[in-house]
Amino acid sequence: MPLVLVVDDVPANLQMVGTMLKDEGVEIAMATNGPEALAAAEADPPSLILLDVMMPGMNGFDVCRKLKQNPSLGLVPVIFLTACSDTDDVVKGFAAGCVDYVTKPFREAELKARVRTQLQLHQLRSLLPICMHCHSIRDETGSWERVDVFISERVGVSFSHGLCPQCLKKHYPGYTEV
């Protein structure tokens, strides 16, 4: 089940958004400020973040920039959900790295549609493209590398190589397994 992190310094707003999304097949996590949001996202990376702009201490733009600088969270989509409706604020939000910008008051059906869209896009972006011929994997930068190298660099495991019975028969037809 996808996790949606909702960040707002007003508890009533958190409750309202949580109630709206409860029937959308998502798990909801909540944070009331920027540092709490960053810690929650780091501890349990969400599939989507709904983020207010105007919060005490660290504003939403700064939170979004910090998320985008974190290699493990940089691809998590952020939708600003805020009362800031000036064009300059909207542009600032996209410059900070958001994928969408919704102003309060918002319509429930519209918010749900935007959340569903971003969750579907995030799921598609989370797929690892693999070459059907050589089985290389395309990484987050668009480069292709062998699957064993890709996994080893990210997980720290080592591989030994061998031949499965099908490949042994295909590539070495005269050899019999001992």
Image (spheres, rainbow, N blue to C red):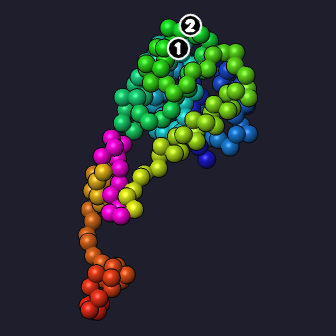
Badge 2 marks a residue whose secondary structure is: loop
**Looking at the image, residue 109 lies above or below residue 154:** above
What residue is at 74 percent from the left and 29 percent from the top? 109
Q: Which mark is residue 86?
A: 2
| Left or right, residue 134 beside residue 74 | left
What residue is at 58 percent from the left and 10 percent from the top? 84
Q: Which mark is residue 90?
A: 1
The residues colored magenta run 133-143
Instruction: Find residue 35 and report its horizontal and vertical position in percent.
Output: 46, 23
Badge 1 marks a residue whose secondary structure is: helix
Dot 1 crowding, Cα within 10 Å, few <14, some 14–19, many 20+: some
Instruction: Find residue 174 and report its horizontal and vertical position in percent.
Output: 26, 92
Q: Quadrant of residue 107?
A: top right
As measured in the structure, the alpha-carbon distance from the residue carrying label 1 to the one carrying label 2 is: 6 Å
What residue is at 50 percent from the left and 8 percent from the top? 88
| Contact check, label 1 and label 2, Cβ < 8 Å | yes
Q: Which mark is residue 38?
A: none
